[in-house]
Image (cartoon, rainbow, N blue to C red):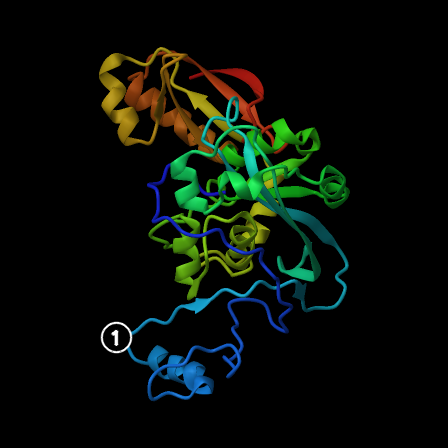
Amino acid sequence: MEPKKRQPARKSKPKAPITSQALVMPPPYMPPATPDTAPTVAGVAPGDAESMAEVLALHPDYRILRRLKPCVQWPGEEPQAVTRIVVLDTETTGLDHSRDKIIELALLRVDVDTATGLPVGAVQVYDGLEDPGMAIPKEVIEITGLTDADVQGQRLDEGRIAQLLEGVDIVIAHNAGFDRPFAEDRIPQFSRLAWACSFADIDWKAQGRSSAKLESLAQALGLFYDAHRAEMDCHALLAVLVGQLPIAVHTGLAHLIAAAKKPSFRLQATHAPFDAKDQLKARGYRWNSDQKVWHTRLADDAALQSECEWLKATVYHQRSAVVQVEKLNSAVKYSSRPGEILHRQL
């Protein structure tokens, strides 16, 4: 799930359950509209809507967005090796997993061809509601359209979720740092799986995207969808990740599968001088008020080495210093559990 620090949207009616449609080709391919499904526009035959879109798309003054249609059957022959993934999203009563609860959980399970980074075969789908045992806040109702009446008496199907998680290699979420603690608190099986984050593990800015928000990433591919309901957010994320990254030479899925195999690091600028705070902040460090230390996340060993060199030269002015490094593998990354604590001499 993408970061939940968002302003309430306009109030909407609860959305009906999604009926997934099998497509011959994966998104962003969109089949032409038909007279039965296309809206009527004055002076335009319903079947001509796609033709109009194609003509407008050729004009430099127009950009075309097509509604995302979920793909539940991906083409391709059975590959030699696959990585089994689950794409996950949650809707919750708030931001704090220690007191807030899940009200909707969606999962898409699919195999990814290791050689191509593309899904193959059928997508297994689960979308369930749950009564949180508390009133859903007004701002959450405005964002999701889910009301107390919608979730009353509802409970997640733990048996079905357990089946879908069996044999899974990686769970992918857009802002796993939010979704993982909620998922683990509700279903302990999630804590035994590797996780990857499509928001944090891909440097979307370096890939030429102006925003890492899921809706923005989908729009860059010419797609729009009804956001902030768990299943459709999962379909949108899968559609985004099957595309080749703009700068890299592989798909988003391939990138996340590779990232999950490598540790990342949380580096603390231990006992950094007070006058270095502006430099640390400008560099992207965050202040931990509980531990009273500036810290940052680094993707790999090379980034850690480079950052330690920057710290010694810029923050500690070549003086000897010992900093704390937390090594995070995919089993604990984005969870509320600590990684391996190390100390490094600069």
The residue wearing badge 1 is: 61
Residue 280 can be seen, yes or no:
yes
Q: Is residue 48 above or below residue 281?
A: below
Question: Can residue 4 be seen by looking at this rendering?
Answer: no
Height in image: 275 above or below 77?
above
Tell me if 279 is positioned left or right of 116 in this view.
left
Tell me which residue sits at (58%, 58%) in the image: 18
Q: Left or right: 100 with respect to 164?
A: left
| x, y percent for residue 259 | 57, 42
Q: Residue 15: horizontal and vertical position, in percent?
A: 50, 54
User: Where residue 290 sits in the image (x, y, percent)?
Assistant: 40, 12
* Quadrant of res 189: top right
Q: Is residue 24 left or right of residue 241?
A: right
Residue type at tag 1: Asp
Helix, strand, or loop for circle 1? loop
Up-down: is 146 above or below 70?
above
Residue closest to the eye, 263 or 110 = 110
